[in-house]
Each structure stands twice: as C-alpha cells, then as structure tokens.
Image (tube, rainbow, N blue to C red):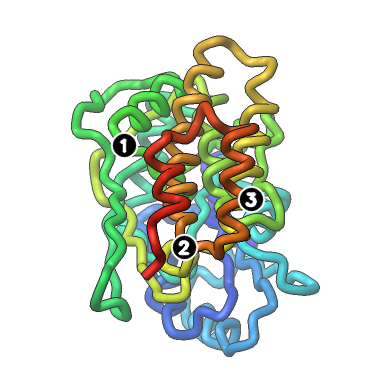
Amino acid sequence: MTFSDMEDLITISFPVYNVASTIERSLMSALNQTYSNIEYLIVDDCGSDNSMDILKNILHNTSRKDQVKIIRHSSNKGLGAVRNTSIENASGKYIYFMDSDDRLETNALELCYQKCETEYLDFVFFDAENFSEEITENLPALTYSHTKELEDKTYGGCEMLSIQVKKHQFTPSPCLNFIRRSFLQKHALKFYPHILHEDQLFTSLLYLQAQNVGFIKRNLFHRRLRPSSIMTSRFAWKNMSSYLTVVYELNYFGQKQSHEIQKTIHLFLSQMLDAAVWQAHALPLQQRIKLLILCLTKYRKYVTPRTLAVLMIKRKK
C-alpha cells in the first residue's frame, strides 16, 4: 500500500456482503474523494453473490488500487464484526465507517479532515439524506438532519448528545461520524458483537466519552433505504433483545460516570427504549406479555404507560 504521509492518512472501512447491485456506485463515491491520502480497508464478510468480483474489477481500473487492502473473514460475522476488524487493522489518523450501498459527497472526507485538524476534534458529524430506488410505498419517516439550533463551535460530547436527544434529532449511524482513531484506542471503543442495533450503543458511547465534537451542516452522506434492511424489516424479538442489551451496557458504563453523563444516559434510554417497545406491538402475544413483565419489573422508568398500553392493545397490520 502506498500513501503520501501516514500522519495525514484517513482509513475508510468498507464492508462487502451481498451488495452486487449497489457496490459500484458506493465504492466509486469513496474512490473519487477529493482527499487523496486514503487507506481503503475492504472487509469481505463472506457473502453468496459476486460482490467481490465486481469490486476487484473496479479496483483493477482505478489509480488508487495501491491504497487498498482486502481482508476476508473466515465466515459471515455481521457488520459490527466487520467494523471491529477495520478498527484493528486501520493505519489512518482518522477512520470513517462506510456502508457499501450508500454514497459520500466527493469532498466529504476533505471537509471532515480539515475541521478535525483545525479544531482538534475527537470526531465530527454531519447531515445526510435518504434515497431509495426500490421502496416506492410506505418509505420510513427517517431523518438524518440535525437540529438547526446547533452553533458552529466545539461541543462536549455529552452536551451534544443531550441536545440532539431532547430535540429528537439524534441519529446513531456511524456513517455520519468521522473519528480520530486514537480516541477509539484510548477508550477501547468497538462495536458490540452479535446483536442488531449495535450502532445505538457504539455511537452513544462515542458521544458520552468525547471532549471535543464538531458538526458540519451539510448533507455529506446519502443513505439508501432497502426493503430487506434492519430499518425496514418487520420488528422481531431479536430487535427487542438487542435494544435491551444496549440498555444493560449503557447502564453498566454509567455506574462510574458523572451525574451529567448518567442523566444523559437516562434521557437517551428513555427515548430509545420507549420507541422500541412501541414497535413491539407487532410481536406475538406471548412475547408481548414477556416484554410487558420486563418493562414493569426492570425498565419502568424508561417506558410510558401509553406505550405499554399500545404494546398490549394495538393490533399489528
């Protein structure tokens, strides 16, 4: 691999798993960045289609092929494990976690690098917009635009998380964050394995431990919505179990933290878990009863009576 300067290097984590129909435009948006000193970590998570063949053909015809490292998992391990592999193998001063069906604006990494260097940020985040070439009806009402009230200044991470949660503007996607790798190393921050919604845990911990956070008020990222994605699939017990894992891990983390951090964790979990239990009305009756008992005995402070009523009364469509 060839880089102009290791001190200015950015690592892009690029996962590959059954994305043959979308990988070309996504990869090209990463390869066409105006910032030149980039390490591309391609992690093959053992899919069943020809995604890697398409990728290798694209790389063969690009001038950046010497900046690419391909790592293959021995078996399918999931997106969290892919990102952990990238953290373990990254050489860059900064790391960016991309998804292989989404797209970046061509100057995204250059803008992020300049802001992080100028203001010495632990990470910078930015806005995004959704698009879909497959979903034409009942498109999920998801937003990746953060509150307009944010000032162009450096915030503490806990403060920034609290502001966004209160405004219902917090989005946990790691793809919206450009992160100083030494910060991840200092806090041993990785993705929790073998659960859904690992982004909720990783990104909240990212904010809670950061001292210097900045924001770029531009749509630098384009998130593709797919019918088979976690965001658009029917809610199942695995979803609920994963949310409960996030609750446990954040509460465990918060035990030795300041009152401010504990207060922000409570605020975040109240919003996250209440929304999750609301979605759980789609579960079978036996699972809803199990969840009701858990909420009444362990999670009562996070879930409203109205949401518990919806859980037991509302019928799934």
Give the foreground label among 2 and 3. 3
The mark that comes first in sequence, 2 or 1, is 1
Compare residues 55 and 276 and report the one nearer the observer.
Answer: 276
Residue drawn at point x = 63 percent, y = 15 percent: 257
The spot of residue 45 in percent (x, y) is 67, 72
Residue pointed to by mark 1: 168
The spot of residue 262 in percent (x, y) is 55, 18
Give the foreground label among 3 and 1. 3
> Is 156 drawn above or below residue 202 in the view shown?
above
The mark that comes first in sequence, 2 or 3, is 2
**Side of 185 relative to 236 (left or right):** right
Question: How far separated are the C-alphas under marks 2 and 3?
Answer: 14 Å
Q: Which mark is residue 282?
A: 2
In the rendered image, the quadrant that contains the C terminus is bottom left
- Near mark 2 (Cα within 10 A), the count class, few <14, some 14-19 or many ≥20, is many
Q: Callout 3, which amino acid? A: Lys
Question: How far separated are the C-alphas under marks 3 and 1?
Answer: 28 Å
Give the foreground label among 2 and 1. 2
Q: Callout 1, which amino acid? A: His
Residue pointed to by mark 3: 290
Residue drawn at point x = 31 percent, y = 36 percent: 168
**Side of 259 relative to 76 (left or right):** left
Q: Which image quarter: residue 18?
A: bottom right
**Side of 112 relative to 15 (left or right):** left
Q: Which image quarter: residue 190?
A: top right
